[in-house]
Every structure is written in structure tokens, then in C-alpha cells.
């Protein structure tokens, strides 16, 4: 079976998580036996930045495109299915879908909608016209789209279109497993990675550290924050570290990739996932790529919410706190850390977590329902 995979990515930035995911998913389709072609409609640089007022106004007009201008080509006809990963809807996308359906009425059209119902990135008044365009266009989808692909199984239908669920996965073989380089003292190096947004909530961990030391705690804890971001969140963490007196215990590593990132992971023995997911429209279930990378590296996880890949699993290397802004208990984190590394050697811990990632985090597992849908419906074409 043949499929076209449509994306809106800046291909030169292949090391970024969202871009990597596109190429990983394409490879996963190919490994599952599908013949794939990738068609990318790269977003225009700066099109929705507030500092680019002219482009911003243009993107907000009714019949202009938000990020990328989808244009139909006759070579797109004749495929068994079409798979889209996109950011926002507009007239150009719905017109493009109409053309696909017109020239190939039997081809299945699937749109990956991972953040539904999140529209937080469009919540500012600057983006309100774009939000209106997005909603207006999406309500036309039931004419053309066969399935929305979503992370949350609670949504059985979106805008009159049935859904098929999946989970975020990674190419585990591409992620280096940890090679510990720390000594056997009781120092606790903790890592938190990501493009910083409010949902990370890393200030909760910083404040938990401060509270622990105010109460006389004596364990040596160092928190490595890796990444940057488009907004003010990183500066917020820096300010909290300064206000709480944690500047010597919170290390802002900046953006890291490749060997530098692996070296930082090698030094850390605990990982922090999202601690404030509730800030994204009240979401309760994380399917973040960072959780998959932590598992592939072989790190125990502390989170502030449920993690989909770990639910209903016998997995003793995960500690969960409440999904709110309540104080976190550092003593509880330390006890968790000690329980993990006192019962097994560090090599054993890494090996078991890595094995879990190989069993549950690969795309063959996380995208299996999509593959099944395409194969089952393809038999009736």
C-alpha cells in the first residue's frame, strides 16, 4: 500500500523534536510495510511572529494561509492513503483536501491532531483572527477527512470525524543509553529537558529544593535544566532560582544536542517530566516525547501527571505528584531515588528501563492502531 505523508516543518532543523518525529513516523510506516513518499510544505519564516507585523496581518486575513500554502499537484493522485501532520487549519488546507478527495475519492485521509483540544498558542489577542480561521476550516473536515489521529482516547469524534488513537513514540535505537560517569556518592543529579513552556512547571522542583534546604536537608541535589524556548518561561525559572537562593544548585545548560546532551544525561540519575500539564486546557495525561527519551536513556522519572505509556504497567521507576501547583515534597523524591538505587545496581536499573522503552515506546507499538486502520479499510477499497 502506498501513502503520502504531508508535513509543515523546517527541514534544516532536523535535530528538533517535532521535526525528528516526522521523519521517525515516516520510517515507522515504511518498516510496517507501507511505501511512503514525504511531501513537505515548509512554513514561511516569521509568518506568525508579532515582530513581523506585516506577515502577521497577512496570516490573519480570511483567505490567506496561516503557516504553509498547500497546493495540489497531479502527482498526488493514486495513493491509498494520505497522512497529515499540521499546526493550524485554513482555507488553503481545506481546499487542498477537497482536491485530494476529488481526484482520489477512494484514498483514505488521516490528520494527526496531537494536541486536541489545545489552542493555547493562539490564545493571545494577536492570534485571535487565526483562531477563528482555524475553527472555521476544521468544521469543514467531515466532508473530506476519514479519521483524526489523536493522543487522548476520550475523544471518539472531532468535528463529526471519527478518531483513531495513538501514542507518541521514538526510534529507541537512535537514542544512546546512559553510560554513568558519576561516582557512587549520594549526590542526586536531576535532569529536565525541553523547549520551555508553562506546562513544564520546573519551578515546582526548584521550590521543592529550596524548601528542603530551609528545613535542614543535607543531601546534595543538583537540577540540570536543558533547553530554551520562544517565551519567558526560561527567564521565569532563572528568576525563581535567584529568589529561592538555588542558583548554585540549578544549572541552566542551555540548548544541547548530540554528544553534549548525552554527556549531561550520563551525569544524571533522575529525570523530571511535566509538572504543570494542567496549564494546557486542564490536560491530565502526558504523551510527551521527553518521557520516551528518558525511558530510552534508562532514567527513573518524576512527573506531575499521568504518563500514558506507563499507565497500567508494572513500572517501579516512576514517581507521580499531583497535577496542580501544590508544593512537592523533596523528601519523597529522595526516598524514591534511594529505593530505586539501593535495591539494584545502576547498570541493572538502566537496563530494565531501557528494555521497557524497547518493548513499549517504539513506533511499531505506538502507531499500531493507525497501521491496523489503514490495512483494514484498505481491504474494502
Image (cartoon, rainbow, N blue to C red):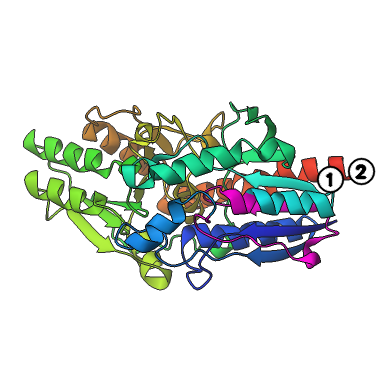
Give the Cα distance between marks 2 and 1.
Answer: 6 Å
Q: Residues within 10 Å of mark 1 (few under 14, many from 20)?
A: some
Q: Quadrant of the N terminus?
A: bottom right
Tell me which corner region of the image, top left, top right, bottom left or bottom right, holds residue 213: top left
Residue 109 drawn at (x, y percent): 74, 47
Residue situated furthest front in the rendering: 62
Q: Is residue 290 magenta?
A: no
Please give the range of residues in magenta.
64-93
Q: Which residue shows up at 42% across the image and 49% down it?
A: 299
Q: Which residue shows up at 54% across the image and 66% down it?
A: 42
- Residue 109 vs residue 361, the one in the foreground: 109
Residue 316 vs 177, above or below: the answer is: above
Q: Are marks 2 and 1 in contact (CB under 8 Å)?
A: yes
Residue 356 drawn at (x, y percent): 57, 45
Q: Which residue shows up at 56% across the image and 28% down it?
A: 312
Tell me which corner region of the image, top left, top right, bottom left or bottom right, holds residue 22: bottom right
Q: Is residue 369 left or right of residue 119?
A: right
Query: Would you say residue 337 is visible in this rendering?
Result: yes
Residue denoted by label 2:
379
Q: Is residue 236 left or right of residue 10?
A: left
Query: Would you say residue 266 is visible in this rendering?
Result: no
- Residue 208 vs residue 182, the one in the foreground: 208
Amino acid at each position: 500500500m502506498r501513502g503520502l505523508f504531508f508535513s509543515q516543518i523546517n527541514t534544516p532543523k532536523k535535530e528538533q523534536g517535532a521535526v525528528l518525529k516526522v521523519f521517525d513516523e515516516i520510517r515507522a510506516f515504511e518498516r510496517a510495510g507501507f511505501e511512503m513518499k514525504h511531501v513537505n510544505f515548509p512554513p514561511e519564516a516569521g509568518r506568525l511572529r508579532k515582530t513581523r507585523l506585516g506577515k502577521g496581518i497577512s496570516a490573519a486575513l480570511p483567505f490567506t494561509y496561516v503557516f504553509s500554502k498547500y497546493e495540489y499537484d497531479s502527482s498526488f493522485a493514486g495513493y491509498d492513503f494520505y497522512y497529515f501532520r499540521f499546526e493550524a487549519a485554513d482555507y488553503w488546507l481545506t481546499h487542498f483536501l477537497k482536491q485530494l478527495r476529488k481526484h482520489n475519492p477512494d484514498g483514505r485521509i488521516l490528520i494527526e491532531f496531537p494536541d486536541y483540544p489545545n489552542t493555547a498558542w493562539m490564545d493571545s489577542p494577536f492570534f485571535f483572527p487565526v483562531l477563528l480561521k482555524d475553527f472555521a476550516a476544521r468544521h469543514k473536515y467531515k466532508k473530506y477527512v476519514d479519521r483524526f489521529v489523536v493522543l487522548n482516547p476520550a475523544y471518539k469524534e472531532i468535528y463529526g470525524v471519527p478518531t483513531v488513537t495513538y501514542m507518541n513514540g521514538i526510534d529507541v535505537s537512535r537514542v544512546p543509553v546512559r553510560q554513568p560517569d558519576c561516582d557512587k556518592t549520594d549526590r542526586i543529579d536531576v535532569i529536565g529537558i525541553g523547549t520551555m513552556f508553562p506546562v513544564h512547571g520546573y519551578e515546582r522542583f526548584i521550590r521543592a529544593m529550596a524548601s528542603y534546604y530551609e528545613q535542614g536537608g543535607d543531601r546534595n541535589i543538583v537540577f540540570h535544566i536543558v533547553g530554551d524556548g520562544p517565551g519567558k518561561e526560561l527567564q521565569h525559572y532563572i528568576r525563581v532560582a535567584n529568589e529561592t537562593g538555588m542558583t548554585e544548585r540549578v544549572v541552566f545548560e542551555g540548548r544541547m544536542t548530540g554528544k553534549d546532551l548525552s554527556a549531561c544525561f550520563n551525569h544524571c540519575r533522575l529525570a523530571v517530566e511535566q509538572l504543570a500539564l494542567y496549564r494546557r486546557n486542564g490536560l491530565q495525561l502526558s504523551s510527551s516525547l521527553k518521557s520516551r527519551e528518558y525511558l530510552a536513556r534508562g532514567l527513573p522519572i518524576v512527573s506531575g501527571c499521568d504518563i500514558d505509556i506507563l499507565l497500567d504497567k508494572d513500572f517501579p521507576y516512576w514517581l507521580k505528584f499531583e497535577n496542580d501547583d501544590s508544593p512537592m515534597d523533596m523528601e519523597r523524591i529522595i526516598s524514591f531515588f534511594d529505593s530505586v538505587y539501593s535495591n539494584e545496581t545502576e547498570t541493572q536499573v538502566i537496563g530494565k528501563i531501557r528494555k521497557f522503552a524497547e518493548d513499549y515506546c517504539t513506533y511499531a507499538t505506538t502507531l499500531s492502531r493507525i497501521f491496523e486502520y489503514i490495512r483494514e479499510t484498505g481491504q474494502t477499497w
